[in-house]
Amino acid sequence: MNAFWIILTGSLVATCCSLLGCYLILRRMAMVGDAVSHAVLPGIVIAFLVTGSRDSVPMLIGAGLLGVLTTFLIEFFHRVARVQTDASIGVTFTWLFAIGIILISMFAGQIDLDQDCVLYGEIAYTPIDLWISEDGWILGPRAVWTVGSVAVVVILFIYLGYKELYLTAFDAAYAASIGISTSLWYYLLMSAVSLTTVASFESVGAILVVAFLVAPPATAYLLTDNFKTMLLLSVVIGVVASAAGYFLAVWLDGSIAGAIATVTGLEFLLAFLFSPSRGIWMNRRKLVPSPIN
Amino acid sequence: MSDFTEFFSFTDANVRFVAIGSVLLASSSAVVGCFTLLRKRALVGDAVAHAVLPGVCLAFMLSGTKNPLVLLLGAFITGWLSLIVIDFITSRSRIKEDTAIGLVLSVFFGIGILLLTSIQHSGNAAQSGLDKFLFGNAAALIGEDLIVFSVVALLLLVCTVVFYKELMLLCFDEAYARTIGYPVRALELLLTTLTVFAVVVGIQAVGVVLMAAMLITPAAAARFWTENLRLMLVLAALMGAFSGLAGAYVSYTAPSMPTGPWIVLIISMIAISSFAFAPGKGWVSRIWKQRRNKARVLEENLLKLMYQLGEPNQDYYSSRNVTDIMERRQIPKSEISKGLRKLKREGYVVKDKNAWVLTRQGQTRGMRVVRLHRLWELYLTQFLELASDHVHEDAETIEHIITPELEQKLMQELQYPVLDPHNNKIP
């Protein structure tokens, strides 16, 4: 049963992240996901200090706000101060992360948080933290409910805003000319990324969030040219990685999050080598000249 | 109380190591960071920082010791491998660079965590403290570390000095470097190696996540102060050194404070203030320059209008109302009064009850603007053959920009003209 809950949590996180990741890698903003997932740390600490509990809702709000602030700062430094994009990402998230660690050290006595748990949360503990209703019903692990509701929000967001997200990702100029606000959809997308990151960090850790945001979409990107197929494929790839990663972790007696990230890397390697249309192995075979008659 | 003194006499001896170590690390990684920043690959440092973890774990698994040199070697190998993989993925598929960086970063780190936890669960007692390598602890630096740091810092510095010209060319014009026969591929490898060195060593002080800042932030800050690469390298190193020292000091006065994050916080504050206030490129100085230009344009326009009001009767020194000026041109009343007050302070106009009078100085400057305007209109009609009703807008802008030398040239080209295309006299 534990295995079921862990794989389910992993798959739900994979679904949210892979879907959003498709947009990020097409917008060349893969590293923004990495930045957001680290920069939410001060938000989590502040929410923790204000409410004094590890309750999910205030943390979600605190970290979500920080996530949006991060994307805003990155845009601000880039647009207004004209810092080059990669530098503006790097400066912003390390700065916020440093503030987060300093806050933790300042209030070390009051906070049961450390940077390890942000970097590699422990998905193995998911089944222990059960949500028990007041009548004594056991409703399953709390993380499944949190991540599950975020997954519903993300899927709804992509379903309802499919056209706008698609157009702003592929042809921002055209999107703007037909009256779609590119910055509104940019910030909506980034809010969704922050929300996902924050909801998942406690159970799977930042590093798996980044792996899910980048690896399954990149793998799917090598396998198809159709965007809808790419969305679906990346979800499938993420879910497969969750299940395979769990068993790999059990076999090696190691971190489940680390194992899942490893499997996403293997999947990418397979696609990179053997993708029917773009794998380098296939291309090499194609390059062999046919004998001249 | 004796505990207190004992503690501090201990740290006092130690604090020298911490301070020197932090300064060496921060300044040498800042120098390397300048090159990666200029190659628009600032975030590769982040990928390398994450990619050292599997190397450290593998080195431990294979050797069974925690000898720092063995661990560093392992870290170096996987760190270096990660950059090669990023290059390979971007050159051999349609995956973009940022995606490749994110992919390599998370997968390498994931493998590292898998190995690390696997080692931890194996019950090997020797493993404890292996993860300290990751989160960095500058306050725990000891003499031996310092030797490694100094060697690496020296190596980085010497390489930068020796290969300065080659690396500069690699950053600014790779194609040109290739044409004149530089071994671009080898230089790229050199830069990669330097980056990995800086990261591998720096991680022990500031940790995986913050290592990216040690490379990017001082370079990004220095970029705002100069256009000269030599100066930028020196500035970045100085900024790095300063924040290294300041970070060590903070954690000395408040021992619960971690050194690494303070170094990063301080260098980030320097960078953000540079983005805002650096002369020339900074955000505030750009806004200020725009404002000053706008004010100058308004002043010159007012003087021009007052001069034009006097033109029909050749009577430049009668008093004019604000309404007279507004009749000729739609400028908000508040701006007109503001501009006039400024002109009064500068001695171009004087106030006469409710009206304004040009001074001699003001008349000369107003005349010059009118003259430049008409000269330009004439130039456009004669040399670009534009219709005379199309040239006014352009002249409105250029009249504030033309320098005396340019004015002289225009006069020569137009053979000292008397009338503009609208048959107004050129004063």
Image (cartoon, rainbow, N blue to C red):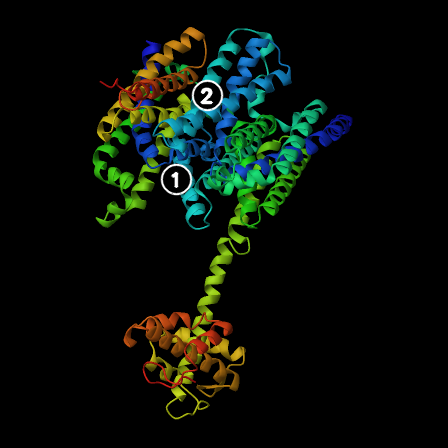
Q: Which mark is residue B108?
A: 2
Q: Position of residue B134 (x, y in %)?
A: 55, 23
Q: Secondary structure at mark 2?
A: helix
In terms of depth relative to the viewer, which is nearer, B31 or A142? B31
In terms of depth relative to the viewer, which is nearer, A185 or B27? B27
Q: Which amino acid is tagged 2? A: Phe
Q: Secondary structure at mark 1?
A: helix
Would you name the residue on which mark 1 appears? A68
Q: Position of residue A90 (x, y in %)?
A: 48, 37
Quarter residue B143 falls in: top right
| Residue A88 visible | yes
Cα separation, mark 2 vs mark 1, equals 27 Å
Q: How many marks?
A: 2
Q: Position of residue B339 (x, y in %)?
A: 45, 75
Q: Are marks 2 and 1 in contact (CB under 8 Å)?
A: no
Name the residue located 51 percent from the left edge and 80 percent from the top edge: B344
Name the residue located 49 percent from the left edge and 13 percent from the top edge: B115
Q: Position of residue A169 (x, y in %)?
A: 29, 39
Mark 2 vs mark 1: in front: 2
Q: Which mark is residue A44?
A: none
Q: Quadrant of the C terminus of chain A?
A: top left
Chain of the residue displaying label 2: B
Judge if badges 2 and 1 mark residues of a common chain. no
Does residue A26 sit above or below A118 in this rendering?
A: below
Q: Which amino acid is tagged 1? A: Val
Neighbour tally class for label 1: few under 14, some 14-19, many 20 plus, Cα within 10 Å: many
Chain of the residue displaying label 1: A
